Image (cartoon, helix red, strand yellow):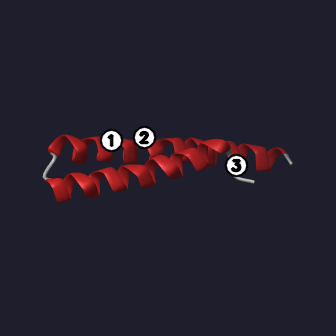
Amino acid sequence: MPDHDRVEGAAKNLGGNIKEAAGKVTGDEKLKADGRADQAEGKIQNAVGGLKDTIRDKRN
């Protein structure tokens, strides 16, 4: 089972993609920037979860 951070990170990344796309459609630069920031945060959180998974797998 994947670490909780991986699942949350993937969700943030997806939400960021949606925000960025909505910002592009509406011409809202702040919404686009917020979407890119959410994507970056999600990718980092996903990577942390991946490290946790690796550590857990090595222990078993």
Most extreme residue toward the left is 27
Callouts 1 and 3 close, C-beta under 8 Å: no
Q: In which quarter of the image is residue 38?
A: top left
What's the residue at 13%, 52% (across, down)?
A: 27
Q: Residues within 10 Å of mark 2 (few under 14, many from 20)?
A: some
- Taking the image as shown, residue 57 lies to the left or right of residue 13, namely right
What's the residue at 86%, 48% (across, down)?
A: 60
Q: Residues within 10 Å of mark 1 (few under 14, many from 20)?
A: some
What's the residue at 42%, 40% (across, down)?
A: 41
Q: Quadrant of the N terminus?
A: bottom right
Which residue has dot 1 on it?
Answer: 37
Which residue has dot 3 on it?
Answer: 54
How much space separates mark 1 and mark 2, taking CA atoms?
6 Å
Callouts 1 and 2 close, C-beta under 8 Å: yes
Using the image, determine if residue 48 lies above or below residue 14.
above
Looking at the rendered structure, the kind of residue marked 3 is: Thr
Please state the horizontal and vertical placement of residue 16, each as a whole percent of the image.
Answer: 37, 49
Which residue has dot 2 on it?
Answer: 41
What's the residue at 70%, 49% (across, down)?
A: 54
* Residue toward you, 1 or 48: 1
